[in-house]
Amino acid sequence: MSKPWAAFIVVLSFALVGAGCSESSAEAGATHRIVITGSSTLAPMIAEIAKRFERDHDGVRIDVQAGGSTRGITDVRSGLADIGMVSRQLGAEERAALHSHPIAIDGICLITHRDNPVAAPTHDQIIAIYSGRVTNWQSLGAPPRPITVVNKAQGRSTLEVFLKHFALRSDQIQASVIIGGNQQAIKTVAGNPGAIGYVSVGSAQYAAEQGTPIKLLPMGGVPASVRAVAEGDYPLSRTLIVVTAHPSTGWTERLIDYAQSPRVHDLISEHYFVPITD
Amino acid sequence: MSRSRTDRWLLVGLRASGAVTGAVVLLVIAFLLIESWPASRHVGLSRWITDPSWYPTSSAADGRFNLVPMLWGTLAAAGIAVALATPLALLSAVFCRFYAPPTIARFYRRMIQLLAGIPSVVYGLWGLTALVPLIQHFRPPGTSLLAGAAVLTLMILPTIALLADAALANVPGDHLRAAAAAGLSRPGTIRGVVFPAARAGIFTGILLGTGRAIGETMAVLMVCGNIVQTPTSLFDPIRTLTANIALEMAYAMGDHRSALFVSGLALMAIVIALVAMADRIGRGYAYA
């Protein structure tokens, strides 16, 4: 009985050693590794910037992982990541502890189905809709149709920015549908003539241009478009930033400078965000 | 001599794979317990049931953590799906085994196998783009318990049908010939001889189907609306425990993250209860 067991253990330990070997050989290359985590809004764009940075510079490898702004902040503070991506405003305590670097600007807009005749609900009407005081489009002068309120899942940055702008609390919102990302919000609104939701201006404009039956509602009298966000008139926008725990040095500093330089403005525009020019 | 040695190696191999399978289940439970420990400690036991709603935050003191509406959501969606899928699946298996001409039966079985292989996200897409707008036409918002249960029904129907079909095929030919000799009609044979003999296999199928319905995530996430509330009508949007984990996991920190592991633990408890129940029922009926 003992012999087979011994053989089994030997095989097992070989397997473990093998796994260990492959890991250490990956580390052995003399490349510097930068880990970036955080906002899933920023992640696709930062990943492309990182790819271009790797192409232009030898000896550096960049890992980009999405997981929400809060995760980015936590990872930077705990040292798990070198750079955190954040798509919401930093809290006072976070601002004191971290160094932030703006990368781009993104607007958030309300969308309805293209066939919805309501052209421009007011600030108060939107609050009334989202807090459940108005539940039918009839109250806004449209033909009667129940309002389907589309809200984002707890923990999403878009939700936080939206709540802050309209001075609402999470538990005041009476939603009919809760969704995860921008794309799901657009699909839900496109499939429901009574729906209203909010998404990133960029993804909404892109979807509308592709023929998706949605309508971008103006905010505070300003039509929602990437250009309005760029011109600074659009009231509901957020600065997409990256944060570091210390004043950045070395590769990290070079990467952040690169991401803030005009060399990546085309990538930022491709993702329907607005580059920061001063 | 050599044969006993082969046997010994086989025995070692079998024991090892048995131990690994058992260990995986225990490890999963242990992992869930460890990960959910911080939330269980900070939130306590009763708040999972007594809190007014589900607004989790990363520190337990500010959040609200009631899991019960999602538990009902999960049970309602899966329960309705199983209740609808089981009779359809059994009828389809009986048709396939006893009434359909061989060519049609073979073709039909292929179709059901194909249905079983469709990825769940495809069902979800279909639900979101076809079923939800249809329901919403009658009762907005459309994303609802009904949509979820309907998609789940389609999803588990082939699983139950295929296993029931296999169970019916395993009924010994002697039984059928004896029934024929006794002058029983075909419906009589199926009701009185085939079903009792195939019960254990049919129950396994229903159990697997129920497990899939409870565990399904992507499709229900897409069509159920994900509002945390106890459903009072078929047209209410609901959130299931699985959808809750998938929706919030990527953004959850601290106690919120840990609370999601508690949802996982609750799911595990449902499945264990289900297996225990099936074991009891199965023992009563199994012949062999």
Image: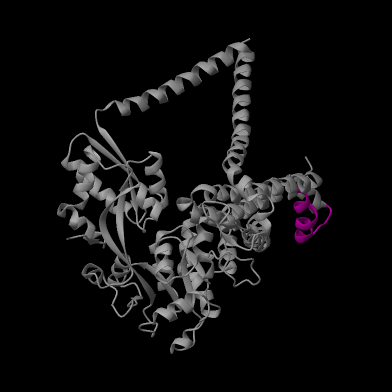
Query: In the rendered view, would you say B122 is above or below B264?
Result: below
**Residue A101 magenta-drawn?**
no
The magenta-colored residue range is B182-197
- Look at the image and tell me whether residue B118 can be seen: no
Query: In the rendered view, would you say A17 is above or below A107?
Result: above
Toward the viewer: B4 or A5? A5
Toward the viewer: B131 or B230? B230
**Direction from residue B186 to residue A52 in the image, left or right:** left
Q: State the quadrant of the C terminus of chain B.
A: top right
Image quarter of residue A253: top left
Residue at 53% of width from left, 80% of height from top? Answer: A133
Q: Percent from the top left, x then y, of residue B111? A: 53, 57
Q: Percent from the top left, x then y, of residue A55? A: 18, 42
- Look at the image and tell me whether residue A140 can be seen: yes
**Residue B196 magenta-drawn?**
yes
Secondary structure, magenta segment, majority class: helix
Query: In the rendered view, would you say B203 is above or below A136?
Result: above
**Direction from residue A143 to residue A220 in the image, left or right:** left
Q: Percent from the top left, x then y, of residue B228? A: 58, 64
Query: In the rendered view, would you say A172 is above or below A66?
Result: below
